Structures are given as structure tokens and as C-alpha cells.
Amino acid sequence: MKILAINFKYLGDVAIMTPSLRAIKEFYPDCELHVLVSEEAVPLLKQNPHIERVWGFPRRRKEIKWGTLKDIIHDLRAQRFDRSVDFIGNDRGAILSRIIGAKVRLGPLVPKGFLGRKWCYTECIEQADDTRHEIIRTWNVLTAWEIPFFPQTPRVEIFPDPEYEEAASQLLPKRGIVCHLSTSQPKKEWPIQYWVEFFEKCSQLDLPIYFTSGYSPREQMLLSELKQHIPSATYLPRFDSLDLFIATLAKAYCLISPDTAPLHMAAGLGIPTIGLFGPTASSRWAPLGRLHQALQGGLCPCSGHLHVCQHSNRCIDQIKPEQVWKALQTLLKVHPVFIP
């Protein structure tokens, strides 16, 4: 049996899907599992042992070349999938589910979208309520196929590409703390001054601190701003390759980050995390497991603001450096540092 899993959303959502992919493979051990995601998300899955093939699809319209698009769809249809499952249920996933044409097409009923989207599927299921963790909400789609829930704490799984091992070792020659500054939404980012104060507290540790940020010019500017305050700190370069970023992150002792994809990547690599949550709920998005801690900011209606919080007292700002320092101290007690 051939099964196609579809997920057209952000990198973090693709990472969060991996426990469900494992559940499919464990329930149908002889199935041939393929996954269709945006091109930029392919490195998250291409080393996953539960997947036979990962298909990359252009996410941004300006990147789409119609000849290439036609070829990808033709090749997907030629696979003659027995089943497909669209975990997200957005317009693109629904339309491609229908075009690819698996015999059984499963997808969630979600609000908005084009009229008649549900007719793209042969089976539909209501979304789990948004009080559940996103890993659970993703897996909930599979209940339509009676795939059982995970027998233990579900864990995101990311596997680094061995080809990037040497380059990653040069960037992180010693195991240390990686601090990721940015997200795609400024309202979720911890203030630069707080990073400065946290770095000063870490001076008493015999443990390297590495700062990194996202790819965009705005995100890289955060590193430049921090460098003005702490010129002596170690700053990782802009990563042009997600493969290299994953391989580098795999060498860290822990990751401290706001709610963004690297938080889920680190968890998937088995790296402890300290997550900083402001407008998003840690109860839904924080990595699961005893080596992961989540700090939640105060009440603030900024989740209704598109990218930038308009309030003078931002919720993310209510997480103080002292709290992050205490969380790190707790982690050091339960997960002693080994520096090769």
C-alpha cells in the first residue's frame, strides 16, 4: 500500500507532524510512505527512516515554474497512491489531494478556504479543539483511519544529514548553549536587552554561548544589534542551508528560543530546550518531555495583531532574564553537560 502525507504550512508544523508519520508506519508497517511538503521543509524529513520519499513543492507563487509544477504533479499521480492524508486542510493541500487522486483522501474540516473544499477529500474529520497540544491535534486526523495514539510521550524526530557533519563541527567546535533570537513575527521575540542581561549571568558558566538568528535581513539585524552590546560573544553566520543549521543544532547542549521552528528542530534532535512563549500558548506549542521547559509571558491581546505587538507592555517582555537563568540552572542539574 502507498500512502501520501501532505503538509503545507510552516517548518515547525512539518516537524510537529513527524510523530504522526511514525504512527502511520507503525500501524501499516508494510506501507510505502511518501510525504509532500514545501521545498524548504524537505531537509526536515529527508533522513527520516520512516519515509520512502519526500516530495518538495514550491510554496511561494513567484517561485512556481509551471513546467516544473506540471512535472511534479504528473510524477505524483503516476505513483497511484492508495491513500493520502492532508494534515493541515488548507486550500493548496486540499486541491493537490484531489489532483493527485489517491483512492482514499483524508483531510480535516477547517474554517475559511474556498467553497467546496471538503469535496476534495473522500473522508473528512473535524479538527481537534485548540486546547490540545498541536502534536495531538495533528495526530487526531488519523483517528479516521483508527490509527491508535502513541503508547508513550510522542516525540518529534529530526535526523541530521551526515554530509554536513564536518562543517557543523567547525561552527560549533564545543558543545554549548545556542540562543536563537528571531521568529517570523517580531511580537514573539525576546528583547535584545534581555539577551544581554542573560549573557552576563552566563559568564559564571564554563559553557560556550552561541547566538544565531533567522535568514532574513530583519532577523540578521537582531544579531548586529546584539553585537553592539556584546562584541565578545560568539555569533553563528547566516545559514544558507537548513541542512547545515540542523547539523549544527544537533551539536548543541541546549537551545533557548522563542516559539519558532528551531525550537521544534532541537527537540526532534534530542536537544533540551527552554522555550520563550508570549502571544502563543506553550500548552499547545512547547516541546514535550522532561528535558524541555517552557516559560509563558503574561496576558496580552497581541495575538490579534498581525506581526508586531502594539501594546506598551508586551507579553513576551514579561519573561525576565532571571527566569531563563533559573530554567537553565534546573536543566544543568537534570542533564549534566558533557563537552567532548
Image (cartoon, rainbow, N blue to C red):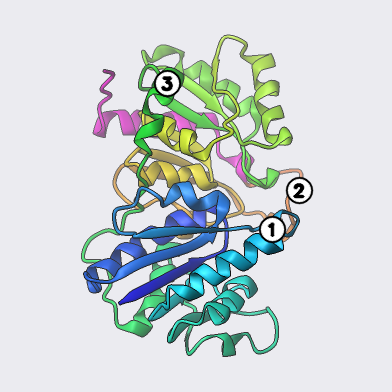
At label 3, counting other C-alpha atoms closer than 10 Å, the crowd grade (few under 14, some 14-19, many 20 or more) is some
Kindly indicate the quadrant of the structure image that contains residue 220. Answer: top right
| Foreground pick, 318 / 224 | 224
At 31% across and 68% down in the image, what residue appears? Answer: 32
Residue with the mark numbered 2:
311
From the top left corner, tell me how far across and down residue 173 is, in percent: 39, 17
Most common SS among magenta residues: helix
Question: In which quadrant of the rendered image does the N terminus lie?
Answer: bottom left
Between the residue at mark 3 and the residue at mark 1, the CA separation in whole angstroms equals: 39 Å
Between the residue at mark 2 and the residue at mark 3, the CA separation in whole angstroms equals: 38 Å
Residue with the mark numbered 3:
172
Query: Which tag, 2 or 3, sits closer to the chain's start?
Result: 3
At 41% across and 52% down in the image, what residue appears? Answer: 45
The relative height of residue 286 versus residue 123 in the rendered view (above or below) is above
Helix, strand or loop at disc 1?
A: helix
Question: In which quadrant of the rendered image does the C terminus lie?
Answer: top left
- Residues under numbered marks 2 and 1 in contact, where contact means CB atoms less than 8 Å apart: yes
Magenta-span inclusion, residue 331: yes
Stretch in magenta: 316-340
The relative height of residue 234 versus residue 30 in the rendered view (above or below) is above
Query: Which tag, 2 or 1, sits closer to the chain's start?
Result: 1
Of the residues shown, which amino acid type is indicated by label 2? His
Q: Is residue 193 left or right of residue 39?
A: right
Between the residue at mark 2 and the residue at mark 1, the CA separation in whole angstroms equals: 8 Å
At 35% across and 38% down in the image, what residue appears? Answer: 272
From the top left corner, tell me how far across and down residue 138 is, in percent: 43, 68
Helix, strand or loop at disc 2?
A: loop
Residue with the mark numbered 1:
301
Q: Nearer the viewer, mark 3 or mark 1?
A: 3
